Amino acid sequence: LILWEVARRCVSGGIVEEYQLPYHDLVPSDPSYEDMREIVCIKKLRPSFPNRWSSDECLRQMGKLMTECWAHNPASRLTALRVKKTLAKMSESQDIKL
């Protein structure tokens, strides 16, 4: 979720989204535990990606990384070390400023 928040604030094509909390479009501004449980655990929803991410290679890769971290099966999710290595590789290969 932190990666999602960071990526939303990245400038791509001169565009940057206004800051929003994850699930801002699905729960009240001050959600209860039950609100979040319903969305995340029962409905199994994840935050949506802005359309512009598909046309920006860095944001597209970040979205892929996030999706892998959000797998419904906990055993399928990436480890923190794998996330760190993937971000380091992205930084090296695309001259990204993290």
Image: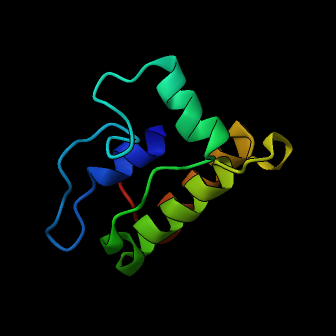
Question: Does residue 24 appear to the left or right of 89 in the view shown?
Answer: left
Q: Is residue 46 above or below residue 57?
A: above
Q: Is residue 83 above or below residue 10?
A: above
Seen at 36% across and 75% down, the residue is: 56
Q: Name the image quarter holding residue 41.
A: top right
Residue at the limit of the structure toward the left, as seen here: 14
Q: Nearer the viewer, residue 2 or 37?
A: 37
Q: Position of residue 59 (x, y in %)?
A: 41, 65
Q: Is residue 21 above or below residue 56?
A: above
Seen at 58% across and 39% down, the residue is: 40
Q: Nearer the viewer, residue 17 or 83?
A: 17
Q: Position of residue 61 (x, y in %)?
A: 52, 67
Question: Does residue 90 appear to the left or right of 85 in the view shown?
Answer: left
Residue at the limit of the structure toward the right, as seen here: 75
Seen at 58% across and 64% down, the residue is: 64
Q: Position of residue 5 (x, y in %)?
A: 37, 43
Q: Nearer the viewer, residue 52 or 81?
A: 52
Residue at the limit of the structure toward the bottom, as seen here: 55
Question: Does residue 9 appear to the left or right of 87 in the view shown?
Answer: left
- Count the marks: how many? 0
Question: Does residue 59 appear to the left or right of 69 in the view shown?
Answer: left
Q: How is the image coloured?
A: rainbow
Q: Position of residue 82 (x, y in %)?
A: 72, 48
Seen at 43% across and 68% down, the residue is: 58
Q: Nearer the viewer, residue 34 or 91?
A: 34
Q: Name the image quarter holding residue 12.
A: bottom left
